[in-house]
Image (spheres, rainbow, N blue to C red):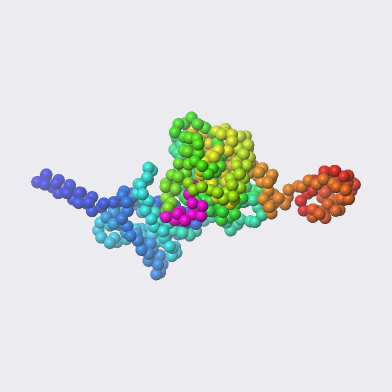
């Protein structure tokens, strides 16, 4: 009798397992400024359907998971999104299914798509909810706050959300470190009356690589700086480096690793590649011939040299010249760009250093100073750098202080004060600094 009961119990377990061909292992909610992402980690590829109930509040998005068991305590689910009121279950279609209801704050056109398993994650089902989903609590300016005639710097903190980036020996996530450096850089830039900063990623969520360049273009940025932390297969390499775009595959090991790591970011971050196929520039494997791209690349290279010169003062450098790689995040034809590797997070000493606020601030200020040095030398037309820049004039025959003051839209007194002149007498060939109007 005892053996019979044991066999019955085993049979029931087998029948139960067969009934639930899949399971929901985890649910994560990633709020970003312009959308919220909900990720279901599945035991196997999701067999699902969904519909909306938008006739009246509460607005509901309902997902049916066929032959699927829920192994998540929804009462412990962390939710900081402004778009989601609640995630709960409801009566399923049948006893072997799970019905998840997401109660929304408004009628939202949800984007639902599966993601295949990869080296880090199993099968996932992703729901993207467009709309402002977090309070804007960041040091950087929002799109609405950006002002004209200031040099605008788009700052891209690498990775985020489901893509942690490199992981240090102590378990430090690259995505957390680079966000702190990016925010420090934004804060320093916004203290400069001639500059303003915009953070591509202001929290722990993922932004697709092409979306990062599009955001920089949308705000007409004068520069895109992407902040990262390097890693290698051994703990020995150390030091910072600055990378600029190449239209060819990198010809060194570090460059190839960086390219491969970037390609993996969209896979881990959960980009729906169906939405990326119509990108204006295409992926980096396509040849880039546009003249504007050539200008952006050369400008990025010159800025990178200025940044390296400043970073040498506060950090050990792995490379002392700008390095080249074919990186999707740098492919805008309109915005000069660079990728700053702040150090090797795989090196125990640099991992510890990158965790300190002091070093983060030093790196941010070095990047800022390098960028500012470039724009002081080559100010974009119409910006405060251009209008406040002193000009040099060589006195010619027949010119007087009043003539020069009228020509340069300034005053005689301002010219005399700038050049420490005690009289109004000028000499042919005399060099004068002309102050801004």
Q: Pick the residue in front: 253 or 379.
A: 253
Quarter of image, res 319: top right
Q: Residue at x 85, y 53 (%)?
A: 403
Image location of residue 428, percent across then percent down: 87, 45
Q: Pick the residue in front: 315 or 31.
A: 315
Q: Residue at x 50, y 58 (%)?
A: 132
Q: Which span of residues is magenta-colored?
A: 274-284
* Count of residue discs: 0
| 153 part of magenta stretch | no
In the image as oriented, which residue stretches furthest toward the bottom?
Answer: 55
| 276 part of magenta stretch | yes
Q: Residue at x 30, y 51 (%)?
A: 23
Residue 181 makes an appearance in the image: no
Q: Residue at x 11, y 44 (%)?
A: 3
Residue 217 makes an appearance in the image: yes
Secondary structure, magenta segment, majority class: loop
Image location of residue 292, percent across then percent down: 59, 50
């Amino acid at each position: 009798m005892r053996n019979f009961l044991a066999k019955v119990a085993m049979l029931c377990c087998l029948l139960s397992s067969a009934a639930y061909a899949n399971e929901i292992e985890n649910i994560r909610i990633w709020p970003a400024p312009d959308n919220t992402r909900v990720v279901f980690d599945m035991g196997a590829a999701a067999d699902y359907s969904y519909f909306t109930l938008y006739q009246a509040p509460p607005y509901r998005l309902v997902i049916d998971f066929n032959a699927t068991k829920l192994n998540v305590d929804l009462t412990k689910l962390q939710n900081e999104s402004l778009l989601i009121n609640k995630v709960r279950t409801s009566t399923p279609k049948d006893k072997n299914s799970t019905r998840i209801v997401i109660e929304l704050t408004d009628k939202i056109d949800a984007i639902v798509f599966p993601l295949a398993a990869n080296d880090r994650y199993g099968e996932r089902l992703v729901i993207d909810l467009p709309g402002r989903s977090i309070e804007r609590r960041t040091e950087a300016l929002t799109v609405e706050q950006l002002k004209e005639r200031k040099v605008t710097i788009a700052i891209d903190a690498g990775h985020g959300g489901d893509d942690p980036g490199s992981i240090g020996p102590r378990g430090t996530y690259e995505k957390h470190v680079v966000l702190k450096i990016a925010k420090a850089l934004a804060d320093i830039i916004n203290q400069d009356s001639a500059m303003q900063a915009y953070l591509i990623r202001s929290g722990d969520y993922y932004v697709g690589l092409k979306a990062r360049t599009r955001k920089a273009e949308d705000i007409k940025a004068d520069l895109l700086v992407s902040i990262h932390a390097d890693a290698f297969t051994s703990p020995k390499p150390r030091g910072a480096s600055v990378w600029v775009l190449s239209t060819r595959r990198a010809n060194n090991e570090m460059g190839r690793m960086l390219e491969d790591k970037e390609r993996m970011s969209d896979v881990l971050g959960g980009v729906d590649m169906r939405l990326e196929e119509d990108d204006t520039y295409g992926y980096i494997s396509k040849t880039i011939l546009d003249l504007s791209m050539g200008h952006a690349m050369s400008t990025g290279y010159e800025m990178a040299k200025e940044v390296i010169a400043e970073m040498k003062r506060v950090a050990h450098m792995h490379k002392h010249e700008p390095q080249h790689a074919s990186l999707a995040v740098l492919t805008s034809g309109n915005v000069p760009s660079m990728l700053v590797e702040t150090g090797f997070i795989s090196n125990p000493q640099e991992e510890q250093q990158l965790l300190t606020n002091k070093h983060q601030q030093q790196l941010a200020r070095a990047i800022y100073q390098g960028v500012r040095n470039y724009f002081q030398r080559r100010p974009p037309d119409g910006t405060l750098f251009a209008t406040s820049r002193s000009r040099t004039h060589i006195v010619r025959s027949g010119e007087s202080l009043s003539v020069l003051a009228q020509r340069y839209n300034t005053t005689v007194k301002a010219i005399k004060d700038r050049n420490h002149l005690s009289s109004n007498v000028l000499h042919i060939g005399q060099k004068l600094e002309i102050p801004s109007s």
